[in-house]
Image (cartoon, grey):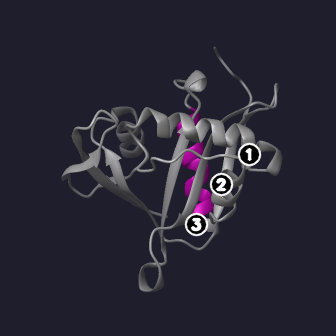
Amino acid sequence: MKIQNIQIRAYRESDLEAMNQIWNEVVEDGIAFPQTELLDSRTGAAFFAEQTYCAVAEDTETGRVLGLYILHPNNLGRCGHICNASYAVSKASRGLHIGEKLVLDCLAQGKAHGFRILQFNAVVRSNTHARHLYERLGFVQLGVIPGGFLMKDGHYEDICPYYRNL
């Protein structure tokens, strides 16, 4: 499948059903997000509304939502200038470089929202596609936290924090 016209834009209420579905796919996979609870129409609407910014990747020919990201502070007060983000691409749309488009938009939105640094706290070591993308886009790995992520199958995987100046 090749999609020519992918637009990254702010999410709308009409996107919530697709956003919940895509988010829940990643949660159910149990290999990337720390969350274990699935979103429903009520919890998903509240979750996405509480973020600093959320965007979707839309196929402009079909109107279908293919992926999304959330952007929010990583901390508060004296560390409130550091943001954090999570990205999700539907299983059917993986391999189309949608993740790269989401990350690039997120970098711009992070800066536009007054953040100075984008930090990822828990990139699972075995998530090689994400790690290669982040490194290609100039993120710096801060080290390794041994056994920092509980995988769905019950074993612990190392996590690799990353950051990039905005």
Q: Is residue 163 above or below residue 97?
A: below
Which residue is denoted by mark 3 in the rendering?
A: 111
Q: Residues within 10 Å of mark 3 (few under 14, many from 20)?
A: some
Which residue is denoted by mark 2 in the rendering?
A: 43
Residue type, numbered disc 1: Leu
Q: Position of residue 85 (x, y in %)?
A: 51, 56
Looking at the rendering, the stretch of residues picked out in magenta corresponds to 98-111
Q: Residue 16: which numbered mark, if any?
A: 1
Q: Position of residue 165 (x, y in %)?
A: 43, 64
Mark 2 or mark 1: name the one nearer the start of the chain. Answer: 1
Identify the element where label 2 is drawn. Answer: helix
Q: Residue 155: which numbered mark, if any?
A: none
Q: Are marks 3 and 2 in contact (CB under 8 Å)?
A: no
Residue extending furthest toward the bottom = 78
Q: Which is in the foreground here, disc 1 or disc 3? A: 1
Task: Please indicate whether residue 146 sits to the left or right of residue 17 in the image.
Answer: left
Identify the element where label 3 is drawn. Answer: helix
Q: Which quadrant of the rendered structure holds the N terminus?
A: top right
Task: Please indicate whether residue 92 sits to the left or right of residue 159 in the image.
Answer: right
Q: Residue at x 71, y 53 (%)?
A: 42
Q: What is the quadrant of residue 38 in the picture?
A: top right
Measure the C-alpha gap from mark 3 to mark 2: 28 Å
Measure the C-alpha gap from mark 1 to mark 3: 25 Å
Measure the C-alpha gap from mark 2 to mark 1: 11 Å
Residue type, numbered disc 2: Thr
11 in magenta: no
Q: Residue at x 66, y 46 (%)?
A: 40
Q: Nearer the viewer, residue 97 or 120?
A: 120
